Image: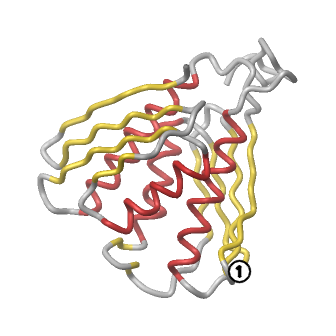
Amino acid sequence: MREFILKRNTAESEVLVDFGLDQYETPEIITPIKFFNHMLDLFAFHGCFKIIVEAHSNDNDPHHIIEDIAINMGMCFKTALGDKKGINRYGWASVPMDEALVLSSVDISGRPHCSFDINFKYQSINDLPVEMIQHFFESFATNACCTIHIKQLNGTNDHHIAEAIFKSFAQSLSMACSLTNKYQNLIPSSKGAL
């Protein structure tokens, strides 16, 4: 079973993440940021992942709690992948949410990069500062060592755009880490390493 649990305590936060790649379980998301909890619930469901997040802020700063969750999630994902033999490597999804449409693409390449082309109208969605959505994906990409592209194709409602982001990323990440007979016992790279 491809799963990893990581606990990380700093002066800023205390974060526990359990990330499983192969079987969906009802997510258990506990953070002080309610809208972010909703986004992580969507991420778990639409990626068919097992995700448990227990996070407590020591400084009441949403930047630190979201960053530390992303760091843990990225590290758990990378570790749970193991040697990467037999994975698809690439994943992509274009997901509508009413008027919003977002495209996400993932390459489990061993090279961290995040391109985030989203236009939010407001500074926050409920209790989530919108700038932290981009920072979440940048921090995840860095610690998972993968390439992420997220692009808004349409949308005017920030809530709908955010949902489309997390749903499309979940589906593209799920596709990329899925095992396939195509590569079976091979690392999907002509270099033989990811």
Q: Quadrant of the N terminus?
A: top right
Q: Which residue is mark 1?
A: 154
The residue that appears at 37% across and 59% down in the rendered structure is 37
Name the quadrant of the C terminus.
top right
Q: Quadrant of residue 133?
A: bottom left
In this view, 65 is above or below 153: above
The reply, left or right, for residue 52 in relation to residue 167 is: left
Nearest to the observer: residue 184 or residue 45: 45
Side (left or right) of 117 relative to 96: left
Amino acid, disc 1: Asn
Residue 67 x, y percent position in the rendering: 34, 52
Using the image, determine if residue 155 lies above or below residue 58: below
Picture layout, residue 111 above or below residue 34: above
Quadrant of residue 112 within the rendered picture: top right
In the picture as drawn, the residue positioned furthest to the right comes out as 182
Q: Secondary structure at mark 1?
A: strand
